[in-house]
Structure formats: C-alpha cells, structure tokens
Amino acid sequence: EEAPLEEAFEQTIARNDRIEPRDWMPDDYRKTLIRQIAQHAHSEIIGMQPEGNWITRAPSLRRKAVLLAKVQDEAGHGLYLYSATETLGVSRDDLTRRLLSGTQKYSSIFNYPTLSYADVGTIGWLVDGAAICNQVPLCRTSFGPYGRAMIRVCKEESFHQRQGYELLMTMMRGTDEQRAMVQESVDRFWWPALMMFGPPDGDSPNTERSMTWGIKRHTNDELRQKFVDMTVPQAKALGVTLPDPELRWNDERQAHDFGSPDWEEFWQVVKGNGPCNAQRLAHRQRAYDEGAWVREAAMAYADRQVDENV
Ligand code: ACO
C-alpha cells in the first residue's frame, strides 16, 4: 500500500524537488531531520551564551548595540528552526526537554569559554564563518521548511561574520596588546571551529544516508576543506597566524593541506565533558524554569481566546 507513496518520495528526491510537511516520508527521514534541525535550533539557543557573556562589558555603545542585535538574531534563528522542526510532528516543549535531558545534542563549539572581548570577533569570523560554509548548501536541502529557514538564517549569519571580522580588523590596527589578544583568541578557536563540521567522513554514521536523501549536500570533510581554503586568505589579510604547522597550499590538489583536529577532544565535548557543557545546560535550565510563568500566562491567554471565539 505504501509503495506508490514511497515511489513519489523517491521521485521528488531524485528531481531535487522539495518534500513538504504533509507529504509522505520514510520514518527514518523524519527522524534524521528532527535530529539535525533540533540540534541546529539548540545550537542557536545555547550559542547565545558565550557571546551574551560580553554584552555588559562591551567596550563602546556601538559594540554593545551590534552584539545585542547579533545575540537577538541567534534567538530568532532558534525559534525559526524550532518551528521548522514542529512541522515534523514534535512540539517545541518536547524538544526543549530533550535538550535539557541531554538526549539531543547541540554544536560542540558552544562548550568553549569566551575569555576575552576578542573572542566576540573570533566567533563572528571563524564560528559564524564555519556556520555559513555549512549552511549555505542547506538552503538546497530536500525538506522545504528547513531549506527556506536557512535562506534567511544565512543572510543574517553573513552580517555576523562581517561584524566579527571588522571587530578583529579594528583590534589589529590597535596596540601590540590588542594584536596579541586577537592571536590568542584565534589560537583557542581555530581547532574547535574545524570540529564544527563533524567527525571525519569515515567516522560519520549519518552522512551517507543524509546525502542520499538530499538532507546534506556535502560531506563533513568537503565542507571543512572549503572552510580552510576560504579562511586562509582572510587570516593573511588580518595579519594573524592560524595555529597549524601542517597548513600549506597543495598545488596538485589546488587546496590547502592541514592538520587533524584532536578527535578525542571532540568526542569528549560531544559526550558532555567539554569545558563548559555543564555550565551551558545549567544556565539553559535556569532560564527555562524562570520562564515558566510566561509560558503559563501565554497558555491561559490562548485558552481564553479560544473560549471567547466559540
Ligand atoms: N557538535 C556536536 N555534535 C556533533 C557535531 C558537532 N560539531 N558534529 C557531529 N555531531 C554529532 C552528530 O549529531 C551525530 O550524533 P547523533 O547521531 O548521536 O545525533 C554524531 O556526532 C555523528 O556525526 P555525523 O554522523 O557526521 O552527523 P550529521 O550527519 O548530522 O552531521 C553536522 C553533523 C555536520 C553538524 C550536521 O548535523 C549539520 O550540518 N547540521 C546543521 C548545522 C548545525 O547544526 N549547525 C549548528 C552550529 S552553527 C551555529 O549555530 C552558529
């Protein structure tokens, strides 16, 4: 009985067309999308914390306004992506519980601390740069609501990346001390940024099937390579050194060779043992608890609207 439905699904995928929420889809397609989009949404929400840490200590009114706007954008991305996940038949409440109980992940990168104001610039340049590299191809993902959400998210991420680069450029034109701050920050974030793309293809259990389904358009290693190639000239223009002695141009491959991130560290962070995992989740839990009255009030209001309309 499901055969014609399955066939229609396969044909839509083969045509590079979009699957929409009301279309039939295999259970595992639905499951992997819920996993990936929810993880993406959680990353946006948890990702507000490392930079939010600097809002009260921004060095000028202008920097504070920019940072506030940026962190608000991340909240918007999270809500956008939770809505996209809800079209697959899960509730935002349920997804939040899965984040807080540790059954759903969020990006490893947000488990590293932000130790200086230069980190705000480095996150914009490297972390949002990596996010763009990973997300631009997702604008063509096979699930409609996810792809459409990515278009707006990517436009805003581009602004984030530029503000980060501009911030670092300003510091690099400053004092020796400021230049040292930038270099120190880049030294800490370079390898974690490379880890954002996920494990090497050989250790990535989901890539092959997600590519077959058009959920992912490139493998983890392909995107990591693209990011390195894109970032090297930017580092040069900025005047910082990327902390990888193996990094060099390979004329034959027309791409950069580079060293391997510490994958043991990556898996530890993914498993919850990174420097800030406990702190990030505790903060999120506290915000959730403190927001209970808002959710209750909103539900009571919504119920009353329904009552008044019948
Ligand atoms: N941080 C945390 N977990 C990760 C990371 C990472 N950087 N990379 C991979 N993982 C997890 C995967 O979720 C998967 O776990 P699970 O199967 O238990 O759920 C496991 O490690 C194995 O990885 P893969 O098989 O390679 O997983 P997948 O095919 O989903 O690829 C990737 C991972 C590239 C992150 C993909 O999910 C993706 O493109 N997601 C959308 C982008 C995104 O989430 N960005 C968030 C950070 S950017 C930002 O918000 C600024």
Image: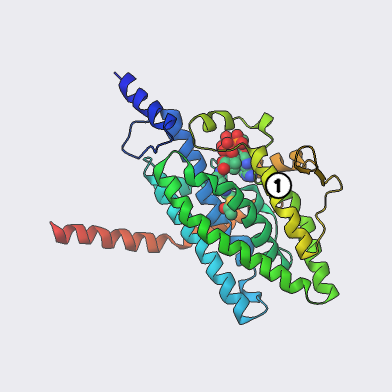
Q: Quadrant of the N terminus?
A: top left
Counting from the top left corner in percent of width and height, residue 209 is at 53, 28
Which quadrant would residue 160 be assigned to in this image? Answer: bottom right
Q: Is residue 142 above or below residue 289?
A: above
- Of 78 and 11, the residue lying toward us: 11
- Of 257 and 62, the residue lying toward us: 257
Q: Is residue 213 above or below residue 134?
A: above
The residue drawn where x is 56% and y is 59% is 157
Counting from the top left corner in percent of width and height, residue 8 is at 34, 27
Judged from the image, the quadrant occupied by ligand 1 is top right
Three-letter residue code for mark 1: Leu
Q: Is residue 186 visible?
A: yes
Secondary-structure class at tag 1: helix
Task: Give the left or right position of residue 35, taking residue 200 as reference.
Answer: left
Counting from the top left corner in percent of width and height, residue 200 is at 69, 35
The residue drawn where x is 68% and y is 56% is 126
Q: Quadrant of the C terminus?
A: bottom left
Q: Is residue 285 visible?
A: no
The residue drawn where x is 65% and y is 65% is 164
Q: Which residue is mark 1?
A: 194
